[in-house]
Image: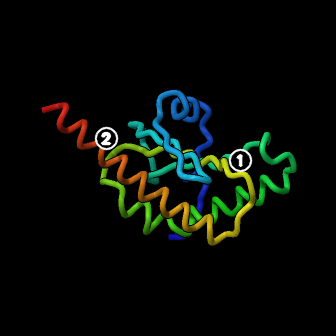
Amino acid sequence: MNTFSKEERLCSRKLLDLLFKTGSSFLLYPFRVSYLYVPVAHQVPVQVVVNVAKKRYKRAVDRNLVKRRSREAYRLQKENQLYALLPESKQLLLLSVQFVGKKIYEFSFFEKKMAAAFIKLHALLEAEQTKKANGDN
């Protein structure tokens, strides 16, 4: 299932505001990843948005190239690297991948860094879940 359908894109202004106001984030150069679980009915386990700052890349051609490479790296690795690591839950994971790099890298670099970001995200989500489980007891 290596597709990137409309249901997987985070478009809701309400959910985006919630993600950036209350979500957690980490930096794994060249990406800043923000994430948040929300109790919303969903068809897919994760909704994602990819951002590239206009301040850093003035030309739309450059921004679009970076976004295409980021989305493609996400699309190819989400099934094995992200979905397989996520716990079975009734919540939707909101994910924002912001490119903060200073130059445009080759696609292989994007793939390696996206995989590393998924591994770090998994570790942080597990740490939050164990903290919640220990805090509730």
Q: Which residue is mark 1?
A: 52
Quarter of the image for the C terminus: give it: top left
Q: Residues within 10 Å of mark 2 (few under 14, many from 20)?
A: few
Q: Residue at x 53, y 51 (%)?
A: 28
Work out whether 105 lies above or below 35.
below
* Quadrant of the rendered image containing residue 3: bottom right
Instruction: Tell me what residue is drawn at x 58 percent, y 45 percent.
Output: 10
Q: Which mark is residue 6?
A: none
Residue 47 against residue 69 in the figure, above or below: above
Of helix, strand and loop, which one carries label 2?
helix
Q: Residues at badges 1 and 2 in contact (C-beta under 8 Å)?
A: no
Q: Residue at x 67, y 69 (%)?
A: 107
Q: Position of residue 26 (x, y in %)?
A: 49, 43
Q: Residue drawn at (46%, 57%), measured in percent from left and top?
A: 118
Q: Amino acid at mark 2?
A: Glu
Residue 134 left/right relative to 21: left
Outermost residue, top side? 21
Q: Quadrant of residue 104?
A: bottom right
Tell me if residue 68 comes above or below residue 57 in the rendering. below
Q: Amino acid at mark 1?
A: Val
Its colouring scheme is rainbow
Q: Residue 14: x percent and y percent? A: 57, 30
Of the pair 59 and 42, the residue shown nearer to us: 59
Expressed as whole percent of the image width and height from the top left, the position of residue 99 reads 65, 50
Residue that label 2 marks: 128
Q: Secondary structure at mark 1?
A: strand
Where is residue 54? Give x, y as percent: 79, 42
Disc on the earlier residue, 1 or 2? 1
User: How packed is label 1: few (under 14 Cα within 10 Å), some, or many (20 or more)?
Assistant: many
* Structural distance between the alpha carbons of marks 1 and 2: 28 Å
Q: Nearer the viewer, residue 70 or 8?
A: 70
